Image (cartoon, rainbow, N blue to C red):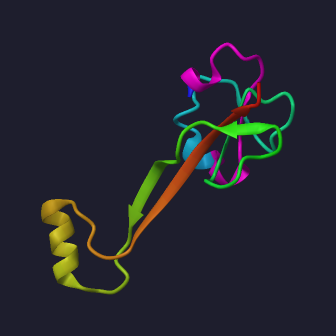
């Protein structure tokens, strides 16, 4: 994230829906949750079209993945305990980085 911010002045602005999952990644940077504005050096949100005045920097990347068994299936739970691999429904949170247009 520091590389995307570069020497641009201003905070990293994060979509409020991603504020909690992004806390660890932004711990050393000036960051705030909210809408992108002219003061934002970088804007991080869920993948989608770029906000007005911003351009996407590459494709989206996973921030977190989670798995919770949808039913009480001991075989799936046993596989997870042994192999640490989720079998079934996997949920993922992805983010995309946007920077101001030059």
The extreme right residue here reads: 38
Which percent across, then down, holds residue 62? Answer: 46, 50
Residue 13 position (above or below residue 75): above
Residue 17 position (above or below residue 30): below
In this view, the residue in front, 63 or 102, is: 102
Q: Is residue 72 left or right of residue 66?
A: left
Image quadrant holding the N terminus, namely: top right
Which percent across, then down, holds residue 56? Answer: 64, 40
Q: Residue at x 70, y 38 (%)?
A: 55
Image quadrant holding the C terminus, namely: top right
Task: Classify residue 17 by image quadrant.
Answer: bottom right
The extreme front residue here reads: 102
In this view, the residue in front, 71 or 86, is: 86
The magenta segment = 2-19
Q: Residue at x 63, y 53 (%)?
A: 46
Q: Residue at x 69, y 24 (%)?
A: 30
Which percent across, then down, holds residue 14? Answer: 70, 41
Residue 84 position (above or below residue 32): below
Residue 14 covered by magenta stretch: yes
Q: Is residue 72 left or right of residue 12?
A: left
In this view, the residue in front, 58 or 35, is: 58
Q: Residue at x 58, y 31 (%)?
A: 26
Which percent across, then down, holds residue 74? Answer: 19, 82
Residue 84 covered by magenta stretch: no
């Amino acid at each position: 994230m520091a590389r995307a911010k570069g020497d641009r002045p201003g905070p990293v602005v994060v979509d409020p829906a991603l504020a909690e999952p992004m806390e660890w990644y932004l711990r050393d940077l000036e960051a705030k949750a909210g809408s992108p504005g002219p003061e934002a050096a970088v804007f991080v949100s869920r993948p989608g079209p770029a906000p007005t005045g911003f351009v996407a920097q590459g494709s989206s990347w996973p921030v977190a993945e989670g798995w919770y068994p949808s039913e009480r299936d001991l075989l799936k739970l046993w596989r997870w305990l042994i192999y640490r691999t989720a079998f079934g429904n996997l949920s993922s949170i992805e983010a995309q980085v946007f920077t101001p247009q030059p």
